[in-house]
Image (cartoon, rainbow, N blue to C red):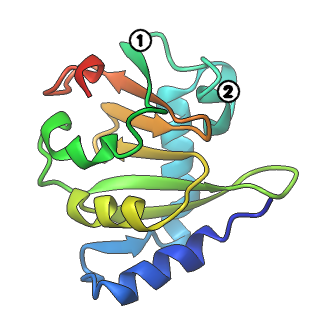
Amino acid sequence: MNYIVRQDIEKTIKEFSLNRNRIFEVSKQNYKQILKKIEQTFVLYGQTIHWANMGYYNQNFSVWTVDCRDNPFWFEKLNKIIPNSQNAVYVLFEEMGRQRPKYWVFEMYLEELIIILNESIMNDYYIVSKKYDWLISENHHRIVSFVGKSFHLSPMKI
């Protein structure tokens, strides 16, 4: 199945009149650099970010995984989990349907991200600190991984 991620996000931005200064796709010039930095920082063995959800996270970081099948709206607590929750983050939305996944990379604030996640059906996605010191991902099985050491709320309590 091919998920139409970008169109869903654009529809939600328009429908909720979200401020485009607070949610926007990263520039084509920065796209590869941001994706490469995320993968070099968080993923083992030169794998792509897609494989990180299979247990290939960098072992220099603490990693917690939480089964959120019974808690599909766990992301509404992001403001309590993430340090400096008022700062913008990078968000990678994975679009499947091809031989290799395509990522739509956005910069946004948590308030807008929560609206997007409430209104859209996403496959795998990744939320990354712009300082590259933590990452949160949710895969299509609703397994959420918390990678890093600076979360305010224990991932086990979500």
The residues bearing labels 2 and 1 have C-alpha atoms spaced at a distance of: 15 Å
**Residue 46: mark in rendering:** 2
Location of the N terminus by quadrant is: bottom right
Is disc 2 placed on a helix, strand or loop? helix
Q: Quadrant of residue 116?
A: bottom left
Residue at left 60%, top 68%?
5
Q: Position of residue 88 (x, y in %)?
A: 23, 57
Q: Nearer the viewer, residue 61 or 126?
A: 126
Residue at left 54%, top 49%?
35
In the depicted structure, whether residue 22 falls above or below residue 34: below
Residue 90 visible to an observer of this rendering? yes
Q: Position of residue 138 (x, y in %)?
A: 49, 38
Q: Is residue 88 left or right of residue 139?
A: left
Q: Is residue 88 left or right of residue 40?
A: left
In the depicted structure, whether residue 66 falls above or below residue 117: above
Is disc 1 placed on a helix, strand or loop? loop
Q: Is residue 54 left or right of residue 29?
A: right
In the depicted structure, whether residue 158 falls above or below residue 96: above
> Upstream in the sequence, badge 2 or badge 1?
2
Residue at left 61%, top 41%?
140
Residue 129 visible to an observer of this rendering? no
User: Mark 1 = which residue?
Assistant: 60
